[in-house]
Amino acid sequence: MATSTIGQTGEESFTRSLNNINQSALKAQLGFLASDQTEGREAGEKGEYLAAAYIASLLQLYGVNPGGDFSRERNSSIDAGSGVRTYFQNFFLIKNAPGDDQIMKVRVTDGKTVRTISFTRNIDFSTESVDQDIEIEAPVVFAGYGFKNEKLTYDDFSKLDLKGKFLLRISGVPGFAKTQLSAAELAASSRETEINAKKMGAAGIIEFDPNSTVTGFQPVKEFQNMSPSEENPAYGRPWPDYSLPGKKSQDNFLKIHISAKSANEIFQGTGFVTEEFIKKSESNNIRSFPDLKDRTIYLKTTVKKETVGVRNVIGMIPGKNPDKIIVLGAHYDHLGKANGFIWNGADDNGSGTVGVMTIAKAIMETGIKPEKTIIIALWTAEEEGLLGSRYFVDNLTYPLKDIILNVNFDMISRYVSESEPKKVTMVYTESFPGFRTITEKNIQKYGIDLIVDFQPSKDPPGGSDHRSFVAKGIPVMRFKPGHREQYHTPADEISTLNWDIMEKIVKISFANIWQLANSEW
């Protein structure tokens, strides 16, 4: 990593900007962004548009140039006049919601006799949205929790043939695993179940929560909520599926949620008792699954499609070299509102959004034009499958090769664990070891009290917007603190944030970005 081209005066300006980053400034911005006024910032909804206008107005206030679409007509000072660049990159999504025709039946064959049990939509079962109508009848296989974890040497899939069959599972993880996995691992477990089921050729997943006694039960998209329960307001919430026009949904896999009563109907006659199975799971004493080979599941689901307008917010800080671009990005959308509750998403991802805006402000406050151009990108529809960042990288107004780095900010206001409140993880593209070097130097030079667990990777993992850049071969860097129990619940409020860790992550990120933007590497 070469020496910075910024001299002593530039260093003094940078230090002043760094010292101006404080918790009060972070709280002031996030206080509105993650408030009830923005209604959870769901893609395409009023609250998201309000949040986008708020973000754009702050970028304008900070002196960041607009980097979005050219306006066709004058709507506001932010949209600017006809033929003038705005802060908004507008595009459309296809919203796929369950249609009116939703049918589920269980057929049990006993010799020449076939017994059919019909389920009632939104009481006995609900389906997650896919992007096409589906009618299927397939065998069903019970897979316990559908849980696989190499660290715990546990695998519910090891002896199963799932090809062309429905996987039936209990939501969550085995009891013994709950105390051995981090909150992030627990949050990811259901998604990993889906990945494994797809790999094995399953027709879809059917899952149930045995503790549910909710009347008029409409199950929840479980992986969006680590431990749904009767007390958890995420119950009863439908989750539509979204896709970019002309592209397949990334989430186009059948997932059906059934009530505990419906599960008992499926197990009837097998001798299986859910409560006994759960008890055995607490001591890792599960040895066999009930045989359901005499049953099939019939499902018919239709889709109702709607076109939804959404927008990314894009700013630009021109550098001396327009052909070398660093993209600072975060998604500003979240999960919206339902059933009288608002998913305000203070950590996810109000924190990352405010982090990016704060760094943009700090760069402008130096009064120095950086060597490289810096794009400030606040994306929509991350929660729907990274759609905002995918649209961004597929619709650039400059060559893709000019982007030399993406720094992604997603959920930066939680610590990894209570026992290590100063520890954060830094994930980055391993072919750029200098990312670690400058981080270590800047932590020491500017007295930033952080302990960083460096995790270089050829293919930096995670379910956030940096993956859109990884897919294009662009180096990435991100700080990843910790998941907490508030993840994807209405409890993700500003009162639960760790402002100290957020301030430190923003400061070290600003220091790193400033050096990378003014160095040859």
Image (cartoon, helix red, strand yellow):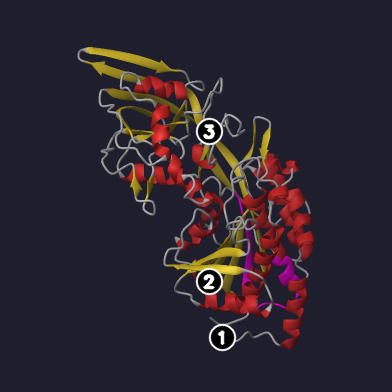
User: Who's the residue at 20% across and 12% down the image?
Assistant: 112
What's the amino acid at mark 2? Asp
What's the amino acid at mark 3? Val
Which of the 4 image quarters holds residue 5? bottom right
Q: Is residue 363 in the magenta section?
A: yes
Disc marking residue 130: none
Q: In the image, residue 340 lies at what x, y percent? A: 68, 31
The residue that mark 1 highlights is 2
Q: In the image, residue 38 lies at what x, y percent? A: 72, 43
Q: Is residue 373 left or right of 55 when viewed as pictured?
A: left
Q: Residues within 10 Å of mark 3 (few under 14, many from 20)?
A: many
Contact, mark 3 vs mark 1 (Cβ under 8 Å): no
Q: Is residue 501 left or right of 137 when viewed as pictured?
A: right
**SS of the residue under disc 1:** loop
Whether residue 73 appears in this view of the structure is: no
**SS of the residue under disc 3:** loop
Nearer to me, 281 or 204: 281
The residue that mark 2 highlights is 402
Disc marking residue 220: 3
Q: Using the numbered discs, state the Cα–Cα distance from disc 2 to disc 3 in whole angstroms.
A: 42 Å
